[in-house]
Image (cartoon, rainbow, N blue to C red):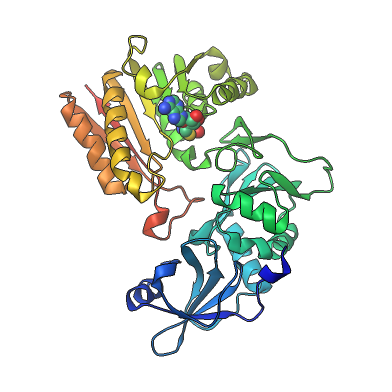
Amino acid sequence: MNPLDTPSLKPIRVRLKPVAESIVRRGHPWVFAESLREQSREGVSGDLAVIFDRRDKFLGAGLYDADSPLRIRVAHVGKPTALDGAFWRGRILASFQRREGLFGDDTNGFRLINGESDGLPGLVLDRYDTTLVLKLYTSAWLPHLPTVIAALRESCPASGVVLRLARNLKEIARARAGLEDGKTIVEGQARTEAVETVVFRENGLLFHADVRRGQKTGFFLDQRENRQRVERLSAGRDVLNCFSFSGGFSLYAARGGARSVTDVDISEHALRSARENFRLNCGEAAVAKARHVTVLANVFDWLNGEAAGHFGIVVIDPPSLARKAVDREGALKAYRQVFSAGIRRVASGGILVAASCSAHVRAEEFYQLVRDEALRSGRRFRELERSAHAADHPASFAEAEYLKAMFLTFD
Ligand code: SAH
């Protein structure tokens, strides 16, 4: 680390513009650069920022990020508190305790820390069997990594911890701390080599997670409960899984008794891992029996093509179509297109599962959009279910509520 960039032990004192002050007081964890009214000095990433209100009273504290317009990630609001090692350790332990009893032995892959919503802003920790994957979304954590790692070592006997970095952090982490995305930063006693892919269990099914290079932390753990819903609906049906990735929904459909499962994805790597995941679970009679087809294609084109046919269940779980607020309009249009094309592929008596992981498209707006497309299809339909965040992915503020899904059945 460049010594000039070492965070100071002396916190930086800041004051906010009135609107931001009220928002933070109500518990929102983000302060953008334009909301800062004054600060006691220039900050560097990782500095502790103490926020004082307009009466000069302690309002809250967080981590300062000089590299991002999202300048302060607030971790605490209320009584004056020092954000020291013991504070972070307490937050990590509390987060682990919140998951106790959520999952049985047949699930050893789940989220242990969900960033802001678990009081550790910009920090995510996923568990895949005995491997932990730590993903950072702000450079403010880089100087505090030793504290985080010490707390993890103490509280969780992992065989390895893999570090993953958000896209905009890769360069910064390399330059400042010599840290690479996908690097094993803690090796357990039982393991000396770096972690590659990991096999873990989700509701008794086995999956590979590409923890070093895969999207997110290697798997989409957030869809677990929606996959279970699909499993319960799949018996005797032909199931289409659009944007299938490594076949998460597909394996559940197969175990639920689907006659066939068709995976469509634009990435050969994703389809290969879906085939591997089917192989991993061939000991399960229903999985071995289901016909598994993989199609390398752009979903938007394929759904409108001749080859598609009709399915008893159509799952459409696209990648985040709006990464930034400015992408919203384009994303809404793409959702409309893909859902209306998907509805045309739902057989009579069949089900559409429409999901969205774009935080910039809010839940109500999304549900309305899906219902609009269902109405436009001219078919009679009935809504079966709506779902949002699972217990290991809590969302404590609006921007964290990214996941939503709707299940509809069509005559
Ligand atoms: N439903 C998955 C997660 C989807 S991730 C699960 O539950 O695990 C998004 C996937 O969409 C990625 O695998 C990516 O390769 C794929 N993808 C992105 N754009 C696509 C397109 N236009 N057509 C087909 N697949 C696409």
Residue appearing at x 39%, y 56% in the figure: 399
- List x then y, in percent, for residue 248: 51, 30
- List x then y, in percent, for residue 292: 51, 15
Res. 137 in view: yes
Query: Within the image, what quadrant is residue 287 found in?
Result: top right
Report the side of 58 relative to 154 (left or right): left
Report the side of 46 relative to 115 (left or right): right
Residue appearing at x 75%, y 58% in the figure: 153
- List x then y, in percent, for residue 409: 27, 27
Res. 243 in view: no
Q: Nearer the viewer, residue 9 or 248?
A: 9
Placement of the N terminus among the 4 image quadrants: bottom right
- List x then y, in percent, for residue 363: 31, 47
Residue appearing at x 48%, y 24% in the figure: 266
Query: Within the image, what quadrant is residue 277 found in?
Result: top right
Residue appearing at x 55%, y 51% in the figure: 168
Q: Nearer the viewer, residue 214 or 34?
A: 34
Residue lying at the far top of the rendered structure: 306
Residue lying at the far bottom of the rendered structure: 55
